[in-house]
Amino acid sequence: MTVYDSFRYRKGMVLLGMFFAFLLFLVSGALSRNYPSAIFTLLTFTSLAGLIAGAYLLRFSCRCPRCQNVLKNDIPVSCPNCGLNLSAVDRDQSNI
């Protein structure tokens, strides 16, 4: 598995977790409005915290293994800072 593939897998898992946190947020928010209970309110705020944590992970979790530069938004094929080829099998191979 290449570094690029592991970043894609990590991004997919975080997005899947955020999707389920969003569903839990919608369901528990609707239930807490119709049936006022502390557990539904707690579930609503917990799922909101999960959404915020997922957004943070999406933004800052993918770093270049060589220079520790944060790869923001989309995952490039090579690091824009040091030029490390992220699609190479070995983490030390470079395209420079």
Image (cartoon, helix red, strand yellow):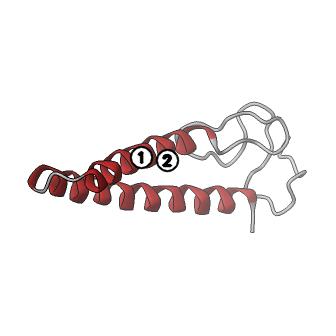
| Count of marks, rendered view | 2
Left or right of residue 54, residue 3 in this image: right
Question: In the rendered view, would you say 91 is above or below 53?
Answer: below
Residue 76 in picture, x, y percent from top left: 63, 45
* Direction top: furthest residue: 81
Q: Residue at x 67, y 49 (%)?
A: 77
Left or right of residue 13, residue 89 in this image: right
Left or right of residue 12, residue 26 in this image: left
Q: CB of mark 1 within 8 Å of CB of mark 2?
A: yes
The image quarter in which residue 57 lies? top right
The image quarter in which residue 62 lies? top right
Question: In the rendered view, would you say 82 is above or below 55?
Answer: above
Q: Secondary structure at mark 1?
A: helix
Left or right of residue 45, residue 11 in this image: right
In terms of depth relative to the viewer, which is nearer, 82 or 10?
Answer: 10
Disc 1: which residue? 51
Residue 83 in picture, x, y percent from top left: 79, 38
Q: Which amino acid, by three-letter code, is at mark 1?
A: Leu
**Quadrant that contains the C terminus:** top right
Q: Residue at x 73, y 39 (%)?
A: 79
**Quadrant that contains the N terminus:** bottom right
Residue 32 in picture, x, y percent from top left: 18, 52
Q: Residue at x 34, y 49 (%)?
A: 42
* Direction bottom: furthest residue: 1
Disc 2: which residue? 54
How many angstroms separate mark 1 from mark 2 (CA)?
Answer: 5 Å
How many neighbours does mark 2 have within 10 angstroms: few (below 14), some (14-19), or many (20 or more)? many
Residue 66 in picture, x, y percent from top left: 85, 41
Question: In the rendered view, would you say 32 is above or below 74?
Answer: below
In terms of depth relative to the viewer, which is nearer, 49 or 64?
Answer: 49
Q: Which amino acid, by three-letter code, is at mark 2?
A: Gly
